[in-house]
Structures are given as C-alpha cells and as structure tokens.
Amino acid sequence: MMYLEQFSYLLASVLFILSLKMLGSAKTARKGMQYAMFGMALAIVITLIISGIVGPTQIIIGMVVGGLIGGVVAKRIEMTSMPQMVALFNGFGGVASTLVAYSEYIRFTGTEAMDVNITVILSLFIGTVTLTGSLIAYAKLQGLLPGRPLVLPMHQILNLLLMLGAIGFGVMNVMEPSVQMWALLIIGVAAIFGVTFVIPIGGADMPVVIALLNSYSGLAASATGFVLSNNVLIIAGALVGASGLILTQLMCDAMNRSLFNVLFGAVGTDDSTGEAGAPGGGEQKTVMRYTAEDAAMIMDTVQSVIIVPGYGLAVAQAQHVLHEMDQLLTARGIDVKYAIHPVAGRMPGHMNVLLAEANVPYDVLYEMDDINDEFQNTDVALIIGANDVVNPSARTKKDSPLYGMPILNVDYARTVMFVKRSMGAGFAGEANPLFFDDKTMMVFGDAKAVITGLVKALKADE
C-alpha cells in the first residue's frame, strides 16, 4: 500500500508539472487543465483511502457534490465576474490551509517537533493573510469597496507593527507550543494584515494582486504539506507558489514597475467611468465622434485591422459579436489580428480566456512584443474598452503613474478607432491624449451595442 501511495503521488506530481508546461500556450491550455484535474483527483482519492479518514462511498459522494457545485458555478459565472471568482478561490485555498494546520496543531499541541511547529505557524499566517486579502480583492473587484487605493493614517507603520506582532507571537508559540492563545493571536494578526495589505492597492494593479495571492495560497498549501508530511501537497503547493511568483513578476515587468511600487504605490482610481478631460489639464479639446455606421464605412476600405480588447469588452459581454465581426472582415480578405497586452483586464490572461470563450482562433491572438511592430503598417487599430494599455502618456509623461509601462503602439496605426462608453480615464486615472488625435475615431456606447451595429452595417453592404 505504501508503494501505491508513493507511486500515485509521483504520478500526480508529474501531471501537475506537465499541466503547468501546457498552460504556457493557449493551444494546449485546455489539455493542461485536464491533466491537473486528473492529478488532483488522484492525489485526493489516494490520500483519503490510505489515511482511512473516509470510505469509498464518502469519497464518491464528496467528489460528486463538489463537482456539481463547481460545474454550476463555472457554467453560470460571467466573464466580468471571473476575476472575483479567482480571488475567492485563492481565499478558499488559504482558509483550507489554515483550518488543516490548526486542526493538526490542536491534535498534537505541545508534542510536535520544532520544525513542524514552525511550518504550522507559517501555514496559519500565510493562509489567513491569503483569505482576508482575497476577500478584500473580491470586494474591490465586485464594487463592494471602492476600487481606488484606501490608505489609512500611518498605514505602513501599522503593517510593520502587525508583522512584528506576528513574528513575536510565532516565537512565543515555538517556545510554548502548548499555549493555544499564541496560535489564535497569529491568526487574528494575519487576518488584519491581509486587509491592510490589500486595501491600499488600486484597481489598476489587481492583476498583480491576484497573481500574488495565488502564490500565497500555494505557499500556504506547501507549508501545510510539511505539517501533514504529505509529499504531493508539498510539491503541488510549491508549484503554485513558484508559478504565482513568476506570474507576479511578469505582470510587474509588463507595467515596468517594481512589486514594491505596486504594493505600496497606491496607484489607481475608483473605475474608468470618470471624465478624463484634456490631457495635462490644459485647454479643453474636443473629440471626433462617429457612429457604428461610420466605422463600417471605414472597415470597407481597409486591408488590415488589429483589435485591442480591454475590460470594457468583458463588461459588455461583446466577445461573441466581436468574433462575428472579425469573421465578416476576414471573409472580405481583410487581415484581422488581436493584440493582447499582459495586464489588459482585471486578472492575468483575462482577455485570452474571454476570447477563447467566443472560439476566437488562437493563431490570431498576439502578445504585445510579437505585434507591436505591425501597428505602423496597419490601417485600423480598433480598441474596445481598453485605455491604460494604449495610453501614449506612458512614453512621455514622467509624472504619470503609467510612465515607463510598455504599451501597445496603436497610435502608430493609420486610423485609431476607440469603442468606449465615455471619455473616462483608465484605472490609473490618466487622461489619454490619443482621444484628441486627428486620426482617432471615438465611437461612444456599450461595446456590444456598437459592435452589433457595426456587424449589421457590414452585412447590409454585402
């Protein structure tokens, strides 16, 4: 039986590693998720059977009930709510680690070795921080809390005191493991720290926060694996923790900002609906307003189009009609591509998942570095609900929170077409001077309504 357990854990670990490899490409991501699902199911079933905690009947019932709940949630969740769901899943992972570690602590209070006690402390702290931090991220994304940074008086000093308190209680727990009060104090301090850690981070930086909290959930799980002496949990948690940290760094690189600046820079606004006004607060400028029919007339005369999706596309649920539009253009011999910025949307990979839902072919999706040089030879850059990732202020305005962030070079295209609900600035709160450029067409309205109108106009011309 021991050999079966170790072989199963080894197989599950290999499947996890293969799944991470496959998740690096949109074409293999679906198969990668299937590998991960099978590996996790195998690890859970073998663990429960070997431990004797529950019998086969209870395992089957639990998996069926859990599968039904997950299936219903996955089926009903809208793409606009996907970041919130990911935030909650991160929190669930954190609280699971906390509960398991605390139950083991209660079971062996005062008898566990020092190294095990230390991993219990780490699991309690990281897991609880992940829980409350994820709940704050969820509340910001859901609109229950303002999306702008909420900075308390002496905020960083408060965070420092909380960290020192957690360390102090951890030391006391190691010295007096039989006193359960120390473990409870660690949980309490961690719960407060999770709130104060995430609440000053603005909406523009939510992709980084989600990636970081995902990493924390993995680290908490790995620490819990040491508590339980469970190899597959150690490996799975370490993989999630490492991949989350790598993704966090990639998100920071995509914004040309350090993780320290993201966590403590307090960048962002409530949302992207406020009026942007003229760039730099200078003379009020006007924009050229167009209709969907005007946009269709332009599309009839071009040879190439690059579409830049943003969060507004997800809000409007316009991905399906957008795919219908790109098929119409492609049928007319127009070269259509999608440009994906790494931090477009509210979570890592948000736009890729959104377009995959509409069955947009993977081979027309291009990352920023692969397509940026093509804008200068493109007839139309069509931006749908995006702002910060195409804002030229990132190149020139040194006092802008966007300064230095690599952007999509849409302003190099011959014609720039924005589909937006309003003149609102992006989540960074920076007005976009491209709105006022002579070659820019501003088509105001809900993205789904505008693109639907464009599709009707294109069909009418056939």
Image (cartoon, rainbow, N blue to C red):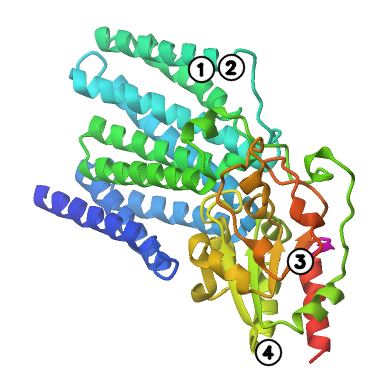
The residue labelled by disc 3 is: 448
Q: Could you tell me residue 365's position as x and y percent?
A: 53, 69
Q: Earlier in the sequence, mark 1 or mark 4?
A: 1
Does dot 2 land on a helix, a strand or a loop?
helix
- Which label lies toward us, 2 or 4? 4
The residue labelled by disc 2 is: 155
The residue labelled by disc 4 is: 332
Q: Is residue 326 above or below residue 120?
A: below
Q: Nearer the viewer, residue 107 or 421?
A: 421
- Real-space Cα distance between discs 3 and 4? 22 Å
Callout 3 amino acid: Lys
Residue at the spot 20% in from the left edge and 45% down from the top edge: 50
Report if the CB atoms under discs 3 and 2 are less than 8 Å apart: no
Q: Where, by quadrant of the figure, is residue 282 drawn?
A: top right
Residue at the spot 33% in from the left edge and 43% down from the top edge: 242
The residue labelled by disc 1 is: 159
